[in-house]
Image (cartoon, rainbow, N blue to C red):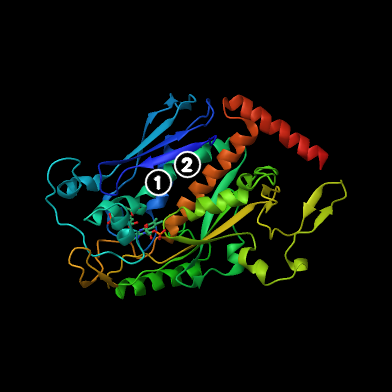
């Protein structure tokens, strides 16, 4: 059984979304506003659709917290869907359906395989749960995990590197500040690239098309030795890649130099190890992205994810109607043109969960005082021995 685990529930247009997070130590001070801030960051981003104008996501903490501190029990988090009141005809839990059915499956979504696998006649039975509205709860869970990590000196940030082929300049990408999130609308550190990205989003929107892109998540301050080389399912790189791939529409993940590793010789990939005058170990490069042998190595952890373009197009793609079995154009519900900045916040959240689990695994997870003491002692030992 996982030491730390969470589950989400709820449909995109249902009454609310819920998450239960279990396994964090008691005695962790939580800041409600920090959770709400991350929820607001996930809602931002040029290119998002009309739904984000309806919702103002704010979390209710239903269990596991008393007077601002965790007590060790499962933490239940809830966010209300304001839009539910407009969908009661199509989303009621009981009674007869009164709203129209969705029968034109969208390529690139769960629609077609979902209706077959679950033996449904209305694509809505599938799309409501496959929708990335669910990532609201991942961000709420991730924000709690971030508080836990922050108390131990570990911070997580992200930036958007590419939208629809428009990339940030390399020197701007590397100007990231550990532990600090930027305030750009697209979560991008290059103002020139950001303007071009916005133009690209405008063009796509005008053409009824959609865009994907790439974002990067950085973990700063993690001690060396989280994860393990001992067994395949204890490798932190594997857990991190799996967590990133679990985000809707993510199709590629790389750690450090990632796919560049295939093109360059070992002399230009591996990070050489040096000793300074005081005998401290250091590296001049971080192409491994902070992970060697499935463990953190003390450098910043750098993970990137590629997101495919949003599958709902306003100039719809060819598809079929599941009822009439005729060729039709895919359904086009209100939709985002580009959601890479939002996905970058979800990427932070999933990374926070993976690191929180690794910390609980290594240092225990009953009481915050014990976890803090164990981390302090371990940091001292590996600082001394290296
Ligand atoms: C933050 C975020 C927002 C998204 N918004 C939309 C959207 O508005 N319309 C849409 O069709 N897909 C959207 N997607 C993508 C779909 O949820 C995703 O492509 C779909 O669930 C199919 O899963 P797959 O792409 O992982 O195969 C969004 C994804 C994320 C991460
Ligand atoms: C609701 C969110 O994203 C949604 C993700 C989504 C999808 O198919 O993934 C489809 C759209 O839903 P709607 O039809 O309600 O506009 C997005 O808005 C959100 O991010 O909170």
State the residue in front, 103 or 265.
Answer: 103
Is 85 placed left or right of 238 in the picture? left
Image quarter (top left, top right, bottom left or bottom right) of the C terminus: top right
**Residue at 44% across / 70% down in the picture?**
197
Residue 381 lies, in percent from the top left, at 77, 35
Looking at the image, can residue 45 be seen? yes
Looking at the image, can residue 182 be seen? no
263 over 366 or under it: above or below: below
Question: Which residue in the structure is indicated by mark 2?
Answer: 143
Q: Give the crowd class for mark 1: few <14, some 14-19, many >=20 residues within 10 Å.
A: many
In what element is the residue under mark 1?
Answer: helix
Residues at marks 2 and 1 touching, judged by CB atoms closer than 8 Å: yes
Residue 8 lies, in percent from the top left, at 39, 41
Residue 12 lies, in percent from the top left, at 29, 49
In what element is the residue under mark 2?
Answer: helix
Determine the image quadrant of residue 316.
bottom left
- The reply to whether the residue tagged 2 has its Cβ within 8 angstroms of ligand 2 is no
Q: Quadrant holding ligand 2? A: bottom left
Q: Earlier in the sequence, mark 2 or mark 1?
A: 1
Question: Which residue in the structure is indicated by mark 1?
Answer: 39
Q: Give the crowd class for mark 2: few <14, some 14-19, many >=20 residues within 10 Å.
A: many
Numbered tag placed on residue 360 in the rendering? none
30 over 168 or under it: above or below: above
């Amino acid at each position: 059984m996982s030491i730390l685990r969470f589950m989400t529930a709820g449909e995109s247009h249902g009454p609310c979304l819920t998450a239960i997070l279990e396994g964090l130590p008691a005695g962790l001070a939580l800041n409600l506003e920090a959770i709400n801030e991350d929820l607001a960051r996930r809602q931002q981003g040029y290119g998002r659709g009309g739904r984000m104008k309806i919702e103002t996501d704010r979390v209710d903490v239903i269990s596991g917290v008393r007077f601002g501190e965790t007590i060790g029990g499962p933490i239940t988090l809830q966010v209300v869907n304001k839009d539910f009141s407009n969908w009661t005809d199509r989303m009621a839990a009981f009674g007869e359906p009164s709203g129209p059915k969705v029968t034109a499956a969208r390529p690139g979504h769960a629609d077609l395989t979902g209706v077959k696998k679950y033996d449904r006649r209305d694509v809505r039975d599938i799309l409501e749960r496959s929708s990335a509205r669910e990532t609201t709860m991942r961000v709420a869970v991730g924000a709690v995990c971030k508080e836990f990590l922050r108390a131990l000196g570990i911070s997580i940030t992200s930036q958007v590197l590419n939208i629809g082929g428009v990339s940030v300049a390399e020197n701007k990408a590397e100007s990231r500040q550990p532990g600090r999130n930027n305030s750009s609308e697209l979560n991008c550190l290059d103002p020139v690239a950001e303007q071009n990205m916005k133009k690209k989003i405008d063009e796509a929107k005008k053409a009824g098309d959609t865009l994907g892109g790439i974002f990067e998540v950085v973990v700063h301050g993690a001690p060396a030795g989280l994860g393990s080389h001992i067994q395949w399912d204890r490798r932190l790189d594997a857990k991190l890649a799996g967590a990133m791939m679990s985000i809707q529409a993510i199709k590629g993940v790389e750690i450090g130099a990632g796919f560049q590793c295939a093109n360059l010789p070992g002399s230009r990939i591996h990070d050489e190890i040096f000793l300074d005058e005081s005998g401290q170990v250091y590296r001049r490069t971080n192409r491994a992205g902070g992970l060697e042998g499935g463990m953190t190595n003390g450098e910043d952890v750098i993970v990137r994810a590629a997101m495919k373009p949003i599958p709902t197009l306003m100039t719809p793609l060819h598809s079929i109607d599941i009822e009439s079995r005729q060729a039709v154009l895919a359904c086009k519900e209100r939709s985002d043109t580009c959601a890479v900045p939002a996905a970058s916040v979800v990427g932070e959240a999933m990374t926070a969960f993976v690191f929180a689990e690794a910390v609980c695994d290594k240092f225990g997870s009953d009481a915050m005082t014990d976890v803090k003491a164990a981390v302090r002692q371990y940091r001292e030992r590996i600082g001394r021995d290296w």
